Amino acid sequence: MSKHKVTKIGVLTSGGDSPGMNAAIRAVVRTGIYHGLEVFGIRRGYSGMIDNDIFLMDSKSVANIIQRGGTILKTARSDEFRTPEGRAIAYKNLKRLGIDGLVIIGGDGSFKGAQTFSNEYDIPCIGLPGTIDKDIAGSDVTIGFDTAVNTAVEAIDKIRDTMDAHDRLFIVEVMGRDAGYIALHSGIATGAENIIIPETKTDIEELIANLTEKEKRKKLVNLIVVAEGGQFGDANELAKIVKGRLPNADVRVCILGHIQRGGSPTCEDRLIASHMGYYAVESLLIGRHNVMVGVINNKIHYTPLNHAVKQKQTIGQEWMKIVKILAS
Ligand code: F6P
């Protein structure tokens, strides 16, 4: 717990944006105002702290944003904040405005920055996990994952219509950086014949044997959902390998890309963002510092920021078995 009694807090979004960040900002601003705090918005993440792009927010400034993707505060990845000089300027700017607590909505890189800053300057920081990748230790959910995975499912369903019409083999690449959650969830939900994720080594011979066997029994429609950042490079590289080994297959590639980051957040993402945003402010008020607000087993859970690092998922082998059985 911190010795500070906060009176003025800053809120920022940092790293890749994710749908639901606006809902979290709204919750932080309105909970802060409810408790009589002054709430400052910081634009473009840590860059805005250094550039002094900081403004007082009121209840109206977060009106009509809960349903909007992106982030009204904008976001960035700041190299300058990684330097002691950059952080010193940031601190001076906060100090001048009297800001004595921060809420950081972002991923593990943003939390590392917050932890370092807080160690140096004793400003309590509360993190909220905002990333479509769902790869943060200390929370079962992250703000934006549900929307991203539903966007992927909607897109893949459309691809299935056309691949089915043409008897094609489609390789669809989804985001996740080096985590396979989006691929696993969207692949299962769209009945993918194969799912390739970085956490599990894929035996290319087994994959080719599986596709060859399907070709022999005239099952030509095959969907492979592959996570970016995997063992084969991008989806085009994988397509080259498959085409080389199955010359008769009509192979197409679709890389879904940034459409997964945009769009109106789902109900689930709006709820978790509102819940976490509320608890971020409550946490600052009771003197918590340097923790991430997460949800584990449907309950709010606090994790020290330095433990809220990137987490690799452990894929239950049972799921992989189910995928194979259901796609046979
Ligand atoms: O971390 C979110 C994410 O969308 C990853 O899934 C992806 O690898 C990366 O960000 C893309 O980053 P950028 O928008 O900088 O290209």
Image: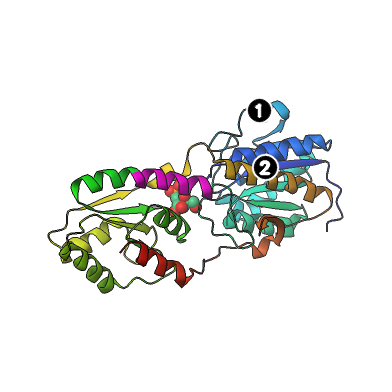
Colour convention of the picture? rainbow
Residue 54 is one of the magenta-drawn residues: no
Of residue 182 and residue 74, the one placed in the foreground of this image is 182
Density class for disc 2 (Cα within 10 Å; few <14, some 14-19, many ≥20) is: many
Q: Amino acid at mark 1?
A: Ala
* Rendered view: 267 above or below 125: above
Residue 49 can be seen, yes or no: no
Rounded to the nearest angstrom, the CA distance separating label 2 from label 1 is 14 Å
Report the mark closest to the observer, 2 or 1: 2
Q: Which residues are magenta?
A: 145-157
Earlier along the polypeptide chain: callout 2 or callout 1?
1
Left or right: 162 as drawn, with respect to 34: left
Q: Amino acid at mark 2?
A: Ser
Q: Could you tell me how many numbered marks the image carries? A: 2
Kindly identify which residue carries mark 2: 274
State the residue at coordinates (61%, 41%).
Answer: 270
Of residue 158 and residue 18, the one placed in the foreground of this image is 158
Kindly identify which residue carries mark 1: 63
For the C terminus, the quadrant is: bottom left
Residue 222 screen position, x and y as percent: 26, 57
